[in-house]
Image: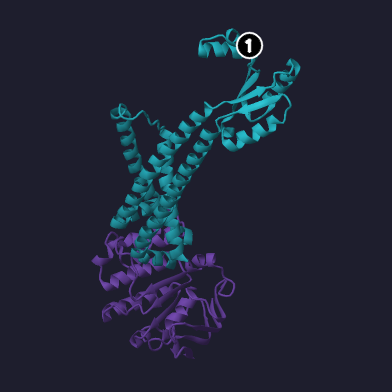
Chain colours: A purple, B cyan
């Protein structure tokens, strides 16, 4: 489903990047990307949603190839890839409903479909009672669940999470990882970039990809 | 349609959120369009007045007295067939003598015991040919005809009219172009500030798979709304100014500004285009 084939990427302004990466991620995988800061975990995620395009090699995401993709096709790829971040990236002046619905507006869904899907996904992440709340009225864990709902509402093939527990307390972190596991059990592949090794143990059969100095040093 | 309403709502929301930057754009468009609108009416009426003056300048073609009626008729037909000429009037020596009597109160036969006045034609040119270059060119062509003795027109006044009209139009065009350019740049910069303040929504929209057009649309709608509001305010001011001029100052100025509803509609469309141009420029730069 996702393949990195001899992928290289270097940033012009700093040393970090990735070198000669080969990696396959299959449907339904739960993958942890671990490694120290600046090792290249976020770069790998950005290459998947084609925020970056490799200098050398090829990244394949379903039918999209980084070597062939055109700029106008990238939004369509991103509708198949969900993303969540450490800082949540929610729109502060919009309600929980609007934050989640924006994904569907961008994909030109009908209004009745939008309502149905948003309410359903918010119930799934246990935020049905917070529909009209603004982000500042939510806890960190709730904010991250809104971000997950926004990513999942478009039914992606894979959910990318970049340090999703970075701003959460241990309890909220555990709740979040349990939620991600539940989502994974329903068939969505999950890739989590994290420093938090304690989380890894909580997912049975998770794959572990260790990144150091811009290279993948081990894959399970 | 649902997407259109969503984007329209986003555009309105952006306008409300942009506050000072939005108000700045509206004021810029407002001031520019007041100047452009008044300038346009002034230029239009100046052209109209100059055209009116030009229409009073006929070209007189004097015919050799030796020309016979057949030659005169042939020449008259030639004049009537020229595209540049709108109206041809033949003045026979007898008619010329009557005119002389009417203008000077004396009979030319009594004064000179003969009629020395030659046959002539008075021609009126079509609007676009009432300038010195065209008149000189037509005059050159006609004077080649053997029966033409002399062609007279108000060369000096036409030269001055052409010269000053050209200067005035150039200045007006330059002012129009400068105001438009300044407005587009200022609106664009103020929308850039708005875009910068809302880079979070742009980056979120791009992450969730919005196309560039979807990201751009609310900003372009916002620009159009700013333009429309600025232009409507300008239309209100211009209407009030002309209303005052036409009702309170008619004794001071011998001028009445006639402005149709179309002018105000075009002004509002123009304002919207100005806003759209500014916002398109800004968002294009930001997305690229």
The residue labelled by disc 1 is: B94
Q: Which SS class for mark 1?
A: helix
B85 relative to B263 in the view: left or right: right
B188 up-or-down from A87: above or below: above
> Residue at point 50% right, 36% down?
B161
Q: Residue at x 53, y 79 (%)?
A: A54
Q: From where the camera sits, is residue A118 visible? A: no
> Is A104 drawn above or below residue A144 in the view shown?
above
- Where residue B280 appears, x then y in whole percent? 45, 57
Whether residue B91 is situated above or below residue B189 in the rendered picture: above
Pick whichever, B148 or A163, lies toward us. B148
Residue A162, given in percent of the width and then of the height, sits at 39, 78
Residue A58 lies in quadrant: bottom right
Is A173 above or below relative to B11? Answer: below
Residue A84 in the image: x percent, y percent? 38, 73
Q: Quadrant of residue A155?
A: bottom left
Residue at x 38%, y 89% (from the top left corner): A36
> Mark 1 Cα within 10 Å, few/some/many (few <14, many 20+)?
few
Among the 4 quarters of the image, the one containing residue A148 = bottom left
- Can residue B200 be seen? yes
x, y percent for residue A194? 37, 83
**Viewer-proximal residue among B25 and B124:** B124
Tell me what residue is drawn at x 45 percent, y 64 percent. Answer: B285
Q: How many marks?
A: 1
């Amino acid at each position: 489903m996702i393949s990195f084939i001899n992928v290289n990427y270097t940033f012009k302004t700093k040393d970090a990047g990735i070198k000669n990466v080969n990696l396959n991620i299959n449907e339904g995988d739960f993958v942890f990307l671990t490694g120290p800061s600046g090792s290249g975990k976020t770069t790998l995620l950005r290459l998947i949603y084609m925020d970056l395009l490799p200098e050398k090699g090829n990244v394949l995401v379903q039918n999209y190839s980084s070597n062939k993709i055109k700029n106008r096709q990238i939004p369509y790829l991103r509708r198949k890839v969900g993303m969540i971040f450490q800082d949540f990236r929610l729109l502060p002046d919009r309600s929980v409903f609007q934050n989640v619905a924006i994904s569907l507006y961008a994909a030109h869904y009908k209004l009745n479909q939008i309502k149905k899907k948003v309410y359903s996904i918010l119930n799934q992440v246990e935020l049905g009672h917070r529909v009209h709340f603004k982000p500042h009225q939510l806890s960190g864990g709730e904010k991250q669940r809104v971000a997950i709902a926004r990513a999942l509402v478009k039914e992606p093939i894979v959910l990318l999470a970049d340090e999703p527990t970075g701003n959460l307390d241990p309890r909220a972190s555990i709740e979040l990882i349990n939620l991600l596991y539940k989502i994974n059990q329903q068939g969505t592949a999950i890739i989590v970039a994290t420093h938090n090794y304690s989380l890894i143990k909580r997912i049975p059969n998770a794959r572990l990809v260790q990144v150091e100095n811009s290279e993948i040093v081990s894959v399970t | 349609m649902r997407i259109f309403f969503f984007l329209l709502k986003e555009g309105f929301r952006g306008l409300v959120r942009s506050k000072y930057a939005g108000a700045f754009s509206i004021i810029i468009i407002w001031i520019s369009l007041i100047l452009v609108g008044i300038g346009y009416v002034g230029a239009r009426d100046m052209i109209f007045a100059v055209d009116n003056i030009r229409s009073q300048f006929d070209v007189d073609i004097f015919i050799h007295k030796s020309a016979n009626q057949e030659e005169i008729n042939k020449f008259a037909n030639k004049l009537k067939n020229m595209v540049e000429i709108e109206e041809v009037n033949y003045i026979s020596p007898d008619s010329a003598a009557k005119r002389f009597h009417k203008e000077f109160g004396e009979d030319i036969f009594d004064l000179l015991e003969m009629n020395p006045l030659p046959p002539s034609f008075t021609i009126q040119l079509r609007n676009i040919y009432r300038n010195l270059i065209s008149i000189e060119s037509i005059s050159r062509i006609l004077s080649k005809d053997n029966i033409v003795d002399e062609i007279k027109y108000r060369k000096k006044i036409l030269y001055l009219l052409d010269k000053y009209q050209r200067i005035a139009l150039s200045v007006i065009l330059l002012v129009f172009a400068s105001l438009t350019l300044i407005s587009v740049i200022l609106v664009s910069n103020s929308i850039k500030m708005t875009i910068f303040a809302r880079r979070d929504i742009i980056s979120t929209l791009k992450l969730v798979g919005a196309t560039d057009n979807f990201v751009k649309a609310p900003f372009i709608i916002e620009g159009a709304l700013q333009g429309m509001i600025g232009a409507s305010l300008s239309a209100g001011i211009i209407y009030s100014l002309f209303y005052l001029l036409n009702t309170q100052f008619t004794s001071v100025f011998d001028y009445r500004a006639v402005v149709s509803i179309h002018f105000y509609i075009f002004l509002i469309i123009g304002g919207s285009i100005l806003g759209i141009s500014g916002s398109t420029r800004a968002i294009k730069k930001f997305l690229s």
